[in-house]
Amino acid sequence: MWKEDLQFIEERTQRRDKKLNEGLSDDEYYRLTAAIKVTLNKVLPSEYIHFLGLHNGIEFNGYSLYGADEDIIPKINAGIVYGIIERNELWYEVEDNRKYLFLGESGESIFVFDSLMNVYRLLDSPSGSEITEFTKLDELLDAFFELSTL
């Protein structure tokens, strides 16, 4: 289902003479995953690596999925890219947040991967409380794109 919502976003973006970001190459996501391991001591889920191969981050209607940090992957992007390492370093200023790898956000929602439990979670932004748990990235992306296209 999320692929249909993504196609809707691509079409809407093209009507404004803009494009979504291109995906990362194999070499680029290898460098990104190595930098995440060194900097954050986390492993980027392979499902998310696959998504970044389609689009290096997405920002639409105030909803963002993080992509490669520009200082690691100097790439010309069509749109805004919030760097996954930079954003996680900000989130990690609060010690309790270190249990997650933050993948995206909006003003009211936070999209994370819980590597200890090997699940994805949708958290409430103000409180950090869990709203929903997902076993697959596809489920989290369904929620992300459904919310972003409302």
Image (cartoon, helix red, strand yellow):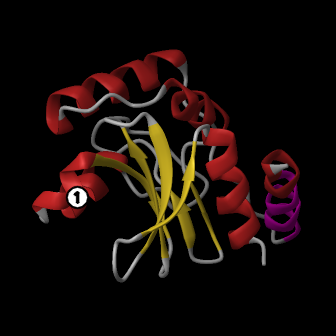
Q: Which quadrant, please, contains the C terminus? A: bottom right
Q: Nearer the viewer, residue 138 or 3?
A: 138
Secondary structure under the numbered disc 1 in the rendered image: helix
Q: Quadrant of residue 50?
A: top right
Tell me where the magenta segment starts and ends, as one range: 7-15
Q: Position of residue 31 (x, y in %)?
A: 34, 22
Vertical side of 125 occupied by 26: above or below: above
Vertical side of 8 occupied by 22: above or below: above
Vertical side of 8 occupied by 57: above or below: above
Q: Quadrant of residue 52?
A: top right
Residue visible at 19% across and 39% down in the picture: 40
Q: Position of residue 70 (x, y in %)?
A: 35, 46
Q: Position of residue 131 (x, y in %)?
A: 52, 68
For label 1, the residue is 97
Residue visible at 45% across and 25% down in the picture: 29
Q: Quadrant of residue 41?
A: top left
Amino acid type, callout 1: Asn
Residue visible at 47% across and 58% down in the picture: 104
Q: Is residue 33 left or right of residue 9?
A: left
Mark 1 crowdedness (10 Å alpha carbons): few <14, some 14-19, many ≥20 = some
Q: Nearer the viewer, residue 64 or 146?
A: 146
Question: Residue 34: within the magenta?
Answer: no
Most common secondary structure along the magenta stretch: helix
Q: Position of residue 9 (x, y in %)?
A: 80, 62
